[in-house]
Image (cartoon, rainbow, N blue to C red):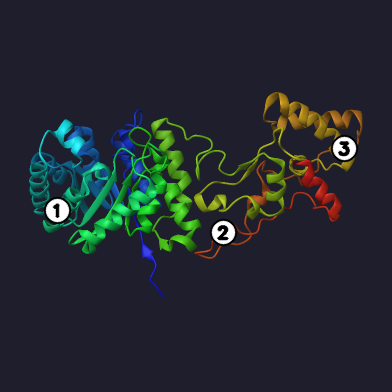
Amino acid sequence: MNETRQIKIFDTTLRDGEQSPGCSMNVQEKLRLARQLDRLGVDILEAGFPIASEGDFAAVQTIARTFDRPVIAALARASEHDITLAWKALKDAAHPRIHIFLATSEIHLQHKLRISQQQCLEQARRAVALAKTFCDDIEFSPEDATRTEPEFLFEILETVIAEGATTVNIPDTVGYAIPHEYAQLLTNIQKTVRGANVVTISTHCHNDLGLAVANSLAGVNAGARQIECTINGIGERAGNAALEEIVMAMQVRADYYGVETNIQSSELFPASQMLAEITGVQVQPNKAIVGRNAFAHEAGIHQDGMLKNALTYEIMTPASVGVPESRLVLGKHSGRHALSLRCAALGYELDRRELDDVYRKFVVLADEIKTVQDHHLEAMLRELNRTQRPALVKKPQAVKSPALAAAASTSGSKKGSRFTTGKPTVDVVARPTDRHREHEDYLWGV
């Protein structure tokens, strides 16, 4: 049996992520988020870019002195001053890593650095050799690797490996690559570059074409053993590959990827929420895994399926990523099943005729105000009490939580299972036993 490959998660939220406009953090904010990233289980925590500012130097130094488990990385350009300062910030870390980058594409060499390929090669060699005098763990990133002439990229990777680099990262700096192309590049590196088999190949993909996660996962399939990513996918321009999406793709589809990480996935949502709180940059509602709507259901057919078995529309449990529970959102697309459940949760059990009356009023209201809240339903139910059924009163055993009771799983999933959602339970209302009635409820959701 083949041994499951371990994928290292390199989190750069505190460095590349912080470069996202409006996402800068002070030392205490970085330290607070670093504690959450440690709880999350990231393998490498890139704490900052010490040369950038005194604050960034202080943040890297503080984080390096605080954590014993993860590797603490600091970024440096391929210059003596950057590397020396990075080491000064890192030297108290239990597991330090100096991460050196240097642009290698022709457009960067000509228009940004204004040096030749030979000068670039020599600069990279000297930089890694210097860093190696400080610590053993050295990562090298040829910036804009995916637009670099392949032969030159192979040559510079061979050079830095020979000088002692232990990780070579292949950045898609401007989000230009497509998955098949990126995977092929990593395959060619492993076939062509001498020493590639003894170092860790890493991915670092940006999201300019919306392909950062797809490219990173393609890299895993092509043999990469480290993925660089950020919480909520924050970063330069359109951002980096989103850590939570990568991790859950590999976990939910373990049958396909056949890899493992050290990430405690139940800490993903707390990490997302903390980052949003610190930066003030909120997550888009439909963001995968951690968005407000990731476990919310409004369409009647979806709600009906969820109430019968959460596996119908959720491929992972909310709890598996740290989300408290699924939500049934009552709107114009909702069906009677969800409305009946919500009324019962508020303490009212309705017969079919009463539910019909409430449902008709509900649909009209939902068309006007988009989302129907509990106080709206309460008003409708009070009106029903007053006009049709004065004896109707709230029952003391009403469900306290307004969320979907069916979201709670009765059992955990087996590791490696394709689906990570257990069988849900519904203890709010009795399910119809008549099959015709069940079918009718389903059709009402259309």
Return the x and y of residue 131 as percentages of the image width and height: 12, 50
Q: Amino acid at mark 3?
A: Glu
Cα separation between marks 1 and 2: 42 Å
Q: Is 391 on the left or on the right of 156, as rendered?
A: right
Task: Indicate left or right for 340 with 26 as reference.
Answer: right
Q: Could you tell me if the residues under marks 1 and 2 are in contact, i.e. CB atoms within 8 Å?
A: no
| Pointer 3 local density, CA inside 10 Å: few below 14, some 14–19, many at least 20 | some
Dot 3 or dot 2: first in sequence order is: 3
Q: Position of residue 295 (x, y in %)?
A: 58, 44
**Which one is nearer the viewer's eye here, 400 or 152?**
152
Disc number for residue 419 = 2
Determine which residue is flagged by label 3.
354
Q: In the image shown, does 427 or 369 lie closer to the viewer?
A: 369
> Which label belongs to residue 263?
none
Q: Is residue 441 visible?
A: yes
- Residue 373 in the figure: left or right of residue 35: right
Q: Quadrant of residue 61?
A: top left
Q: Alpha-carbon distance for marks 3 and 2? A: 38 Å
Q: Nearer the viewer, residue 293 or 279?
A: 293
Marks 3 and 2 in Cβ contact (< 8 Å) = no
From where the camera sits, is residue 43 visible? no
Mark positioned earlier in the residue sequence (3 or 1): 1
Q: Which mark, residue 160?
A: 1
Q: Where does the C terminus fall, quadrant-wise? A: top right
